[in-house]
Amino acid sequence: MENQINTQMEQRKGRRLVLFPLPLQGHINPMLLLATILHSKGFSITIIHTNFNSLNPSHYPNFTFHSIPDGLLESEASSSDLVALVKLLNIKCTDPFRACMDKLLSDASQEPISCIISDPLFYFTQAVADSLKLPRVVLRTGGLSSFVVFAAFTLLRERGYFPIQDSQLEEPVVEFPPLKVKDLPMINTVDPNLYYEIIASVVNGSKASSGIILNSFEELEQSALDTLRQEFPNPIFPIGPFHKYNLTSSSSSLLAQDQSSISWLDKQAPKSVIYASFGSLAALSESQFLEIAWGLANSNQPFLWVVRPGLVRGSEWLEPLPTGFLQTLNGRAHIVKWAPQLEVLAHPAVGAFWTHNGWNSTLESICEGVPMICMPFFTDQKVNAKYVSQIWKVGLQLENGLDRLEIERYIKRLMVEKEGEELRDRISKLKEKAKFCLQQGGSSLQNLDSLVSHISKLES
Ligand code: UDP
């Protein structure tokens, strides 16, 4: 058996995979973890990345890196309009990506390329792959349940859900219970039509690909997986949670992770701390920020809060906080610019995660059995939050805007009351399922084997 595995690994050593992550934190992390997983299966790994949010090759000595000029102007790279950013990246990266691929393909000293693995938001890569006669597999870095909603966007538009009317926000989306219109994965953008166009390109590009890899696991999103398998012609491989594979992988964090988070947590009582972090992209107004600050302070629980520079619109960092805010809390609060989130969630002192429900954060919380307070901002976060609060029932969603009294009340429900214990019990069970799918015979490991054999058979 071991000999057979070694021979298969040897055969794959002659095959190279080219991975192309979207240059945003929540997309980079899973793509680099996937690279580590596939490298452990014997593939050689080449990463193509943009200058924007460039990666550090020295963290990954086993991979080959190629940087391409994305041509983004400074104002474009720092724009808060993510829809416009994605569109620009797709336009501006096309020629440099193709040139980089041409160079890789003509380099006789390199192993042959089995396929390109790209983020589906880089939808232009399907046409490039086709023209180079290379197969393309996509890594969807978000959840399956939200992907199914994106896949139905055209239908939902035909049925009149878009553009969303304020008067309809509380109405049910009958095609996707328990979602309401306000939970549909929308985002503020100057050009909603561009958003629909991008979603259509992502969905069609994913359908046209040679396979879809997901950082999720069957037991978590079985019904969405069934739907997707019916609607999509290509094979689908949920092989997550990626960060729980027993492999050493370097951090792909774009910001330095403040390790004082851990030494501060070491001094706190078990399950007493609320960890609050809203990911790499979300932004708040000053008044929302202050409601959060006072809600946390008035809860009387210790809290670790990630305030990313840029989180508060128009502020550098903590300036909106009243003078002496932290001092009056007598060590009960610790604020950092960026935390080692995986270590934080795994720390015994952490009792709850107040999150924006980005998919990575949601999955990371599930894997550590930490119940959530959900505060989604945009796109798939809204669907994830509904799943957390109403399908898996492992969190509470703040529904009525940001108000310090309401926040205090939610924290008490989760940290002090019986309701919190029930959520904790349920998420512990999900945590066990997440663990099980990566044990021998578990669904994700089986799907990984299928993926590896699928990629090995792809003909360029
Ligand atoms: N993260 C981190 N430190 C922080 C906050 C977040 O390392 O202080 C990581 C987190 O573990 C996750 C990623 O950044 O892997 C954020 O991805 P997610 O999908 O949750 O949200 P996004 O940033 O895409 O909105």
Image: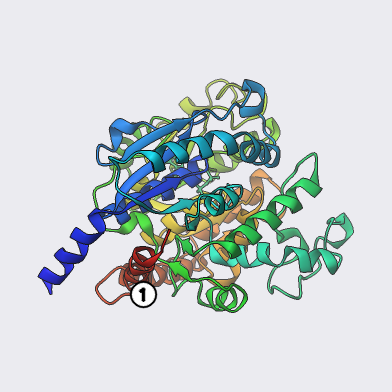
User: Residue at 74% across / 66% down in the picture?
Assistant: 180
Q: Amino acid at mark 1?
A: Ser
Residue nearer the viewer, 292 or 24: 24
Q: Image quarter for residue 453?
A: bottom left
Mark 1: give few (<14), some (14-19) or many (20+) Cα within 10 Å: many
The quarter in which the C terminus is drawn is bottom left
Q: Respond yes or no on whether mark 1 lies under 8 Å from ligand 1.
A: no
User: Residue at 48% across / 36% down in the picture?
Assistant: 306
The location of residue 24, given as percent across then percent down, is: 52, 40
Residue 336 shows in this picture:
no
On screen, 232 above or below 201?
below
The location of residue 286, given as percent across then percent down, is: 68, 30
Residue 214 shows in this picture:
yes
Provide the residue designation for mark 1.
Answer: 443
Residue nearer the viewer, 193 or 285: 193
Mark 1: secondary structure? helix
